[in-house]
């Protein structure tokens, strides 16, 4: 089979003006022939909202983005006016392990090369806006520190859209103002979170003013409003706040906008893009990062609260390969048939189904089929799901495009008419400690939560200023339901350890770091960048 890049390069794309015209969008700012920034009326959000999530991810692959794109194509192929909305890729993972993040096979958003690289410049704008804040903080310090910043207590961090472990701990400043600092990856920055949770430009500006920069020498918080640069930061973000419109390989509309990670941020595309899609389509398909324990939990508990949204159906993506890994099969043995391990691995799937049920939402399990899956394995998983009373469908969109996802599309459409009893895992009035415990127990299956002395000290400080009433954004390894990335399957009676708290007051949540999770990833020993190249004609190779 052709590579994802080859398939994308051979696609017959429509001009982006045609895609916009078909949607009835009049305000369009093209970036070349196949990408555009758009603005439309979002006062009437009539579309049905479908959330795509997954089991705990593995290196075997789950195909959540591929399923999201394929479902949009499949829904359109059966007569539903469907629009997609998902996150922008970060260049860190593109050049690291993951490679491209625009779907795969015959279920991709295109132009794939541009989307995975600079796209319309949103990531650069976010990075620049973020680092203007850091530069202004250090400029205050250099010119006499009128705000009396405590150099050991500055909490706002620089960022870069690249995996670079060398930037986890750095020194900045001159001899008299030297201090320790660190970088986040751009997709874990608070500016990214604010972009994705803002309703409009003025909401963005107001949120920026609430950013916590650090503390003064008396221990009093210093907010960005005191720096006087909220207008400048918003000006940098003027274009980035507009959603990006692209298309699928089958010329169906797709918004790709905003890109926070779900393990260290809230993992959802922008609220603005989702609102645009809901105002234009009958069905909107969106995704949240990693498994239901991370992305779906944050989608419901954070994004839905902020945007007054409610999913009408959830698609839970699972692959036979990943389930076998959760059933303790070694990676190198995944191509060998193993029904027993497959069924054992279903314990992980059941936990994610339980999490979706905690939110009171209808769901469909998507069996995302790989070429290596045997008929006996597909039959065994189908029988398991049927006997367990789970709605499910087989998807082959990677290999067949929309024709391979029509079974899933019909199941989703039938679920859109089902009654739901949507609720959150915690109440906003709960204490921060209670919110964390409810997430750990309901979404992860943990028995209890332990807090480090540092986290408890921070919690007491946050209580003084009322910050403990904010929403919670858990930072946890994505490859385990626990906070230990070595534990697969569906562990029981484990403890979640809270290491540190970070106040993202502009975003409106407290980031709760667990275990050893990092907000600046590193590159692997052999990064994906080693396989990439470009020839004299500008043709890209190795981007996947």
Image (spheres, rainbow, N blue to C red):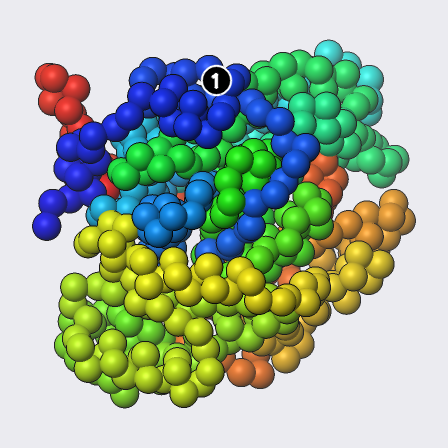
Task: Indicate the position of residue 459 as horizontal and vertical percent values.
Answer: 79, 55
Q: Which of 279 and 326 is in front in this view?
A: 279
Task: Indicate the position of residue 461 as horizontal and vertical percent values.
Answer: 83, 50
Q: Which of 333 and 243 is in front in this view?
A: 243
Q: Nearer the viewer, residue 284 or 300?
A: 284
Residue that appears at 15% across and 44% down: 3
Residue that appears at 76% across and 27% down: 206
Task: Indicate the position of residue 395 as horizontal and vertical percent values.
Answer: 30, 62
Res 438 → quadrant? bottom right
Residue that appears at 69% across and 39% down: 507
Q: Can residue 311 be seen in this view?
A: yes
Q: Which of 143 and 175 is in front in this view?
A: 143
The correct choice, above or below, for 379 with respect to 164 in the image is below
The residue at which mark 1 appears reads as 28
Residue that appears at 68% across and 43% down: 307
Q: Can residue 520 be seen in this view?
A: no
Res 384 → quadrant? bottom left
The correct choice, above or below, for 254 with respect to 142 in the image is below
Image-based side of 530 in relation to 162, left or right:
left
Image-based side of 196 in relation to 369, left or right:
right
Identify the element where label 1 is drawn.
Answer: strand
* Crowd class of label 1 (few under 14; some 14 to 19; many from 20; radius 10 Å): some
Total number of numbered discs in the rendering: 1
């Amino acid at each position: 089979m052709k590579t994802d890049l080859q398939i994308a390069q051979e696609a017959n794309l429509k001009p982006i003006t045609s895609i916009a015209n078909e949607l009835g969008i009049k305000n369009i700012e093209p970036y070349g022939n196949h990408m555009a920034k758009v603005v439309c009326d979002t006062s009437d959000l009539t579309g049905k909202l479908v959330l795509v999530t997954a089991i705990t991810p593995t290196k075997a692959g789950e195909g959540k983005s591929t399923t999201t794109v394929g479902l949009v194509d499949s829904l359109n192929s059966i007569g539903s006016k469907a629009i997609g909305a998902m996150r922008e890729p970060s260049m860190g993972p593109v050049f690291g392990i993951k490679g491209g993040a625009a779907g795969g096979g015959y279920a991709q958003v295109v132009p794939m090369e541009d989307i995975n690289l600079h796209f319309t410049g949103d990531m650069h704008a976010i990075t620049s806006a973020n680092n203007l804040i850091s530069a202004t903080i250090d400029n205050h310090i250099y010119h006499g520190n009128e705000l009396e910043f405590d150099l050991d207590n500055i909490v706002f961090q620089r960022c870069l859209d690249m995996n670079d472990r060398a930037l986890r701990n750095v020194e900045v400043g001159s001899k008299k103002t030297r201090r320790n600092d660190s970088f986040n990856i751009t997709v874990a920055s608070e500016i990214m979170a604010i972009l994705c949770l803002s309703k409009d430009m003025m909401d963005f500006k107001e949120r920026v003013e609430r950013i916590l920069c650090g503390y003064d020498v008396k221990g009093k918080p210093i907010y960005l409003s005191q720096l006087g640069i909220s207008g400048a930061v918003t000006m940098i973000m003027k274009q980035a706040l507009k959603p990006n419109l692209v298309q699928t390989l089958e010329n169906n509309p797709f918004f790709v906008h905003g890109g926070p990670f779900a393990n260290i941020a809230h993992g959802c595309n922008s609220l603005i893009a989702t609102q645009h899609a809901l105002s234009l389509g009958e069905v909107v398909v969106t995704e949240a990062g990693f498994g239901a324990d991370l992305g779906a939990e944050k989608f419901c508990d954070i994004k839905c609260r902020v945007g007054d949204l409610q999913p009408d159906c959830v698609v839970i993506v699972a692959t036979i390969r990943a389930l076998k890994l959760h059933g303790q099969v070694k990676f190198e043995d995944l191509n060998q048939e193993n029904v027993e391990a497959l069924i054992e691995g279903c314990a992980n799937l059941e936990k994610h189904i339980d999490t979706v049920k905690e939110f009171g939402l209808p769901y469909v399990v998507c069996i995302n089929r790989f070429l290596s899956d045997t008929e006996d394995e597909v039959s065994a998983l189908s029988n398991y799901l049927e006997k367990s009373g789970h709605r499910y469908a087989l998807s082959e969109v990677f290999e067949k495009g929309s024709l391979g996802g029509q079974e899933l599309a019909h199941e989703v459409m039938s679920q859109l008419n089902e009654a739901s009893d949507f609720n959150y895992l915690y109440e906003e009035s709960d204490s921060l400690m209670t919110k964390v415990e409810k997430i750990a127990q309901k979404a992860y299956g943990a028995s209890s939560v332990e807090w480090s002395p540092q986290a408890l000290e921070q919690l007491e400080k946050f209580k003084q200023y009322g910050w403990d009433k904010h929403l919670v954004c858990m930072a946890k390894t994505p490859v385990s339901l626990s906070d230990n990335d070595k534990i697969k399957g569906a562990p029981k009676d484990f403890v979640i350890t809270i290491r540190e708290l970070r106040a993202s007051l502009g975003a409106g949540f407290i980031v709760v770091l667990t275990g050893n999770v990092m907000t600046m990833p590193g590159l692997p020993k052999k990064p994906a960048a080693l396989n990439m190249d470009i020839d004299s004609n500008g043709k890209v190779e190795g981007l996947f």
